[in-house]
Amino acid sequence: MEKRKVIILGSGPNRIGQGIEFDYACVHCVWALKEEGYKAIMVNCNPETVSTDYDTSDKLFFEPIVYEDVLNIIESEKPIGVIVQFGGQTPLKLAVPLQNAGVNILGTSPSSIDIAEDRKKFRELVIKLGLKQPESAIAHSKEEAINIAGSLGFPLLVRPSYVLGGRAMRLVYDMSELLKYIEEAVYVSEDKPLLIDRFLDNAVELDVDAVSDGEDVLIGAIMEHIEEAGIHSGDSATCIPPYTLKDEILYQVKEQTRKLAKALNVKGLINIQYAIKNDEIYIIEVNPRASRTVPFVSKAIGYQLAKIASKIIIGKKLKELVPEVFDIKDKHPATDFHSKDFKVYSVKEVVFPWNRFPEVDPLLGPEMKSTGEVMGIDEDFGMAFWKAQAGTGAILPEKGNVFISVADKDKPYIVDIAKDLFDMGFQIFATEGTHRYLSKYGIPSKEVRKLSEQRPNIVDEIKNNNIHLIINTPTGRKERSDAYHIRRAAVENKIPYFTTVRGAKASVEAIKSYRNKNYRVYSLQELKNIG
């Protein structure tokens, strides 16, 4: 008797915003289906992935992930169903059209996917569940965008609808920036609306990966972003478990995750992004699919989320797959997938291709730019962050000179960071405004000239290897500004730099830890015993 066939749709060609992390999930899905006696058929069109290796799946179709090609394969193979939730956004978009063509979509239903993807439907669901979202609206014309901006107030997060990896997403702080964005970056029309969200300034962002079988929901991990909300989740360093938030907030995040997963009748994986501001929890986005953090979470917690989700999709239950978890559920507020309290921090840091693109501003924002990631593990958060930085090639200095230049809105938050650096023996260099501000709080710094002033200026100091760490937060989106040239000089001279206050704070913790603690290397196998 021939095995029952299941088709898995991959993520298509690698590009920024959707890459190898989704291929990881697809491969684990294939392995899980094989373990359960199914014939796994892979559809993908990238020769550089494991899912397209000749010995990964039972059968491979090297075809584009588009409606016509996928439908042709389905008609030829006649599977019991198709899995769309492991290849990222590309196959997810095909869920409703394929179902309308009579295809059986396994796992979370296309109607639930549509609710999560449709902003109006999802907002209605959030209100029904008594949860919160940042204020938002949709503009179908330039005039409508201006009126919405006046109503919501600045800062705003603006983006075209249906984007991948936050492409063309922008954070705007005033009306002139909004108008410039509309005129230069996007075309707004009835068919191509502009999504406008009230931006939560200085909020902490969280990512949650969970798995649900329609009855039970288990949290894989709550990841606290090290950068503030407003940096694309794919570009932000993250930490498991969260390192600054109260247990009560984490408990509420878990409960909201369960509510959303059950309301959407998720069968498989779900990823939710939250923002925490003034102890209030706001839902930013819900993805009823595998996320790019699944490999990181799986390695950190010791459970293969994609494999568990795959077996749920074909009918198994969580209590059957991970019975040990249900015996210890809720022992730790940050996760359900651990048998005891966390003893290590796992920090994910991202890798950027700045050195390949000499004209690109190496500034973090809502549009994703990273092309890889690394992981640092330690019992101490600072040491885990230091290891993650080292993994990207950025070795944080133990001593030397630090250049600090921050936007006015960040100056109150930089004082403690500067004081810690000074107390550790670093000499601080600062531009005029930051120098004056630090002086008010009794923190000595050496004033350095801007690029626009006479030489030697800050870029000269960087090129002469007189600066060993840079903290430079953006003051606005000015093309080819002084800050742009500082950041480019940092990249070209391989000097660690941070463009957010939280990133800078974490770097100080890392330097302290490296100076005070013994460096120790852990293996993932060892972590299964101590984590």
Image: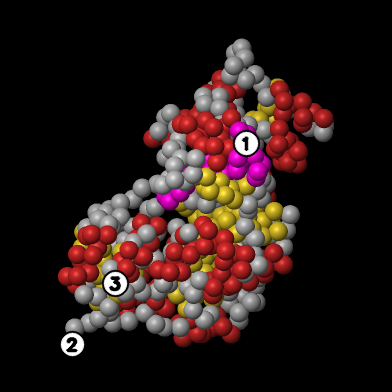
Q: Which residue is mark 1?
A: 173
Seen at 77% across and 29% down, the residue is: 437
Pointers 3 and 2 in contact (C-beta within 8 Å): no
Picture disc at residue 164? none
Q: Label 3, label 2: how many angstroms apart (C-alpha)?
A: 23 Å
Amino acid type at circle 3 is Val
Image coordinates of residue 476 in percent, x first then y, are: 60, 32
Relative to the observer, which residue lies in front, 287 or 392? 287
Seen at 22% across and 82% down, the residue is: 3
Q: Which residue is mark 3?
A: 103
Q: Which residue is mark 2?
A: 1
The 10 Å Cα crowd at callout 3, few under 14, some 14 to 19, many 20 or more, is some
Q: Above or below — where is 179 with respect to 525?
A: above
Image coordinates of residue 254 in percent, x first then y, are: 62, 69
Relative to the observer, which residue lies in front, 10 or 522? 10
Relative to the observer, which residue lies in front, 510 or 140? 140
Q: Secondary structure at mark 1?
A: loop
Seen at 60% across and 59% down, the residue is: 283
The 10 Å Cα crowd at callout 2, few under 14, some 14 to 19, many 20 or more, is few
Q: Is residue 77 something one can see in this rendering? A: yes
* Residue 233 inside the magenta-drawn segment: no
Amino acid type at circle 1 is Tyr
Q: Earlier in the sequence, mark 3 or mark 2?
A: 2
Amino acid type at circle 2 is Met
* Residue 151 inside the magenta-drawn segment: yes
Q: Secondary structure at mark 2?
A: loop
Q: Secondary structure at mark 3?
A: loop
Residues in magenta, as a range: 147-175
